[in-house]
Amino acid sequence: MEYLLLSRLTRLDVKWISELQGNEHFGLHKSNPFFELIMVTEGPIYLQVGEEALELQSGETFLLMPWEKHGGWQPIAKQSGFYWVQFAADPGLLLHKEELDEGVPFTSAAHQDLRTSSTESLTDFLLLPRRSKPFNRYEILGIFEKIQQQFSAPKGYFRYRASLWLGQVLELLAQDLVDQRHIKSEVSSTFLLYRRLVNVLDESYTSNPSSKELEQKLYHSYDYLSQLFKRHTGITIGSYIHQLQVQKAKHLLSSTTSIIRTIAEEVGFQDPFYFSRIFKKLEGISPQQFRDSVLNRQTNE
């Protein structure tokens, strides 16, 4: 079985949608520069994809890659047909041909919950079946109808709505795969505790919460909380607090004229020299050098 990986950050753009019924245009072999999702309204549909001849039944879906040659390899009944929607995706969907382990854990990149995570570090994705017969096929067909209505009578933000609905279709296909393959998707109690810990740190980092304060708020020993945080993020609690403090300091350095000592105190440092040392350790330059670089960039713009 083949799968497609869709990044959570992918921008979807519906280019066109239509419903084909009967043999008009069906037998023509074609390709296009976009991804294409087909959903059979009534089968069978005899679809050739590359060298492979497929027989798709009512309710089945199939995802075509850009420029993938496809067409009919045998005539279909007059009442047979399917919806097809062409869409751009940036970044694109990746083809994945490895077989899934029934017990594979649900993808969850815990470091994404950190305020300091960059968009480049966001790696989670939807796992889409290239060919499937979803249990929720009638719900998906209903959404296809909505998308087609938007293109049949376009007005206002119809492309925006169409892209949102396409995202909903892909999420339903991904969730159906999880349900049918019994892929573990429950979030563990330890992950929930980790999320609570992150929230506490996000809300209290300027006061440098002590180990005792964290224990009182989260009802676990500091040693356990430290191990849990390090396991999920790869860094220590203290390192994350410093990242949060420097993150806010960068905002204040670039948006205010406050002196560095004042900024250091506002983000949680009583010693401005220690603040400068931590700032340079994380950013590679001193707070003043960072402020100067921002001013120079703004002047040049």
Image (cartoon, grey):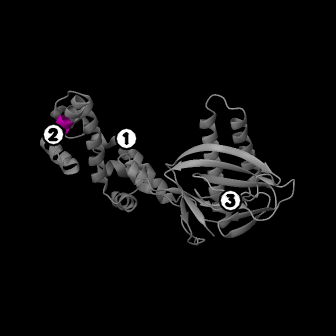
- Residue at 64% in and 62% down: 130
Residue furthest right in the image: 78
Residue 87 percent coordinates (x, y):
60, 48
Q: Which amino acid does label 1 sit on?
A: Glu
Q: Name the residue under label 2.
A: 289
Q: Nearer the viewer, residue 202 or 297?
A: 297
**Could you tell me if residue 184 is visible in this image?**
no
Q: Name the residue under label 3.
A: 62
What is the crowding at mark 3: few (fewer than 14 residues within 10 Å), some, or many (at least 20)?
some
Apparent side of residue 247 relative to residue 6 in the rendered image (left or right) = left
The region drawn magenta spans 289-293
Looking at the rendered image, the quarter that the C terminus falls into is top left
For marks 2 and 1 on the same chain, the one whose residue lies earlier in the sequence: 1
Pinpoint residue 63: horizontal percent, then vertical percent: 64, 58
Marking on residue 241: none
Nearer the viewer's eye, disc 2 or disc 3? Answer: 3
- Quarter of the image that includes the N terminus: bottom right
Hey, what amino acid is under mark 3? Phe
94 relative to 206, above or below: below
Q: Looking at the image, is 175 positioned above or below residue 159?
A: below
**Measured Cα–Cα span from mark 2 to mark 3:** 55 Å
For badge 2, the amino acid type reads Gln
The residue tagged 1 is 203
Of the numbered discs 2 and 3, the one sitting upstream in the chain is: 3
In the shown orientation, is residue 109 left or right of residue 183?
A: left
Sequence-first disc among 3 and 1:
3
Describe the element under mark 1 as helix, strand or loop. Answer: helix
